[in-house]
Amino acid sequence: MADETSADINPAPQPNGEDNGPAIGLISQYVKDLSFENPNAPAVYQWQSAPQIDVQFNIGADGVGENLFEVTLKIDVTSKFDEGTAFVIELQYAGLFGVRNVPDDQLQPFFLAEAPRILFPFARRVVADAVRDGGFPPLLLEPIDFHGLFMQQLQERNAAEGEMPAPVGEA
C-alpha cells in the first residue's frame, strides 16, 4: 500500500495581522528619468552606413521606507554611424516593491534577478517607443537572463574572494 501524504497547497487564510509568511509584491512601476537626444537631426536621416548600437545596463535597489524598496533598471543606448551619433537614450525605469517577512539573504537575489525580470519588458517598450518617436525604427532590446547574470556575478565574486560557490538547488 502506498504511503499517503497530505500536502495542503491552499492553507486556510490567517486572521488579519496573523499572516506571517514571506511575501514580496510590486506596488507600482514608473519612468523615473528619461532622456532622448537626437544631436544630428535632420542630417542623420540621410546617413546610409549601418549604425553601431551600444547598450549598457545597471540595476540598483534602495530601501525607501519600512518594508519598501525601489529597484531601478538603468538602460543607456547609443547609436553611432560613421558620420556621427544618431541618438542617445538614457532611461531609469523603477519599480516599488513591498516586502514582508523575507530573510535578508533572499532580498539581494530577488532585487538583482527577479525584480529586473519583472520590470524589463516595460522598460523595453519605453525604449522602443522613445526611439520610434525620435524618428528611427523602434529598437527592440533582446531579452536578458537576469538570473543567469546574477549567478555569474556571484560566482565571479566568490572566486575572487577564494570562496566555494554556494550550492544551487537540491541534489
Image (cartoon, rainbow, N blue to C red):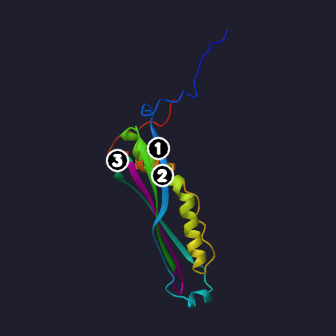
Which residue range is magenta in the image? 68-86
What is the x, y in percent for residue 60?
Answer: 40, 57
The image's mark for residue 13 is none
Q: Quadrant of the N terminus?
A: top right
Q: Secondary structure at mark 1?
A: strand
Please give the residue where the numbered disc 1 appears in the rendered image. 24
- Where is residue 9? Give x, y as percent: 58, 28
Can you see residue 155? Answer: no
Q: Is residue 69 magenta?
A: yes
In the rendered view, would you say 112 is above or below 54? above
- In the rendered structure, are the residues bearing label 1 and label 2 in contact, judged by CB atoms less than 8 Å apart? no
| Residue found at the very far left of the displayed protein | 161
The tag earlier along the polypeptide, 1 or 3, is: 1
Inspect the image, locate mark 3, and give the three-letter code of the amino acid beneath it.
Glu
Most foreground residue, 9 or 43: 9
Side (left or right) of 133 relative to 71 = right
Indicate left or right for 153 with 135 as reference.
left
Q: Count all numbered tags in the image, as a single digit.
A: 3
Disc ID at residue 66: 3
- Figure check: 157 above or below 121: above
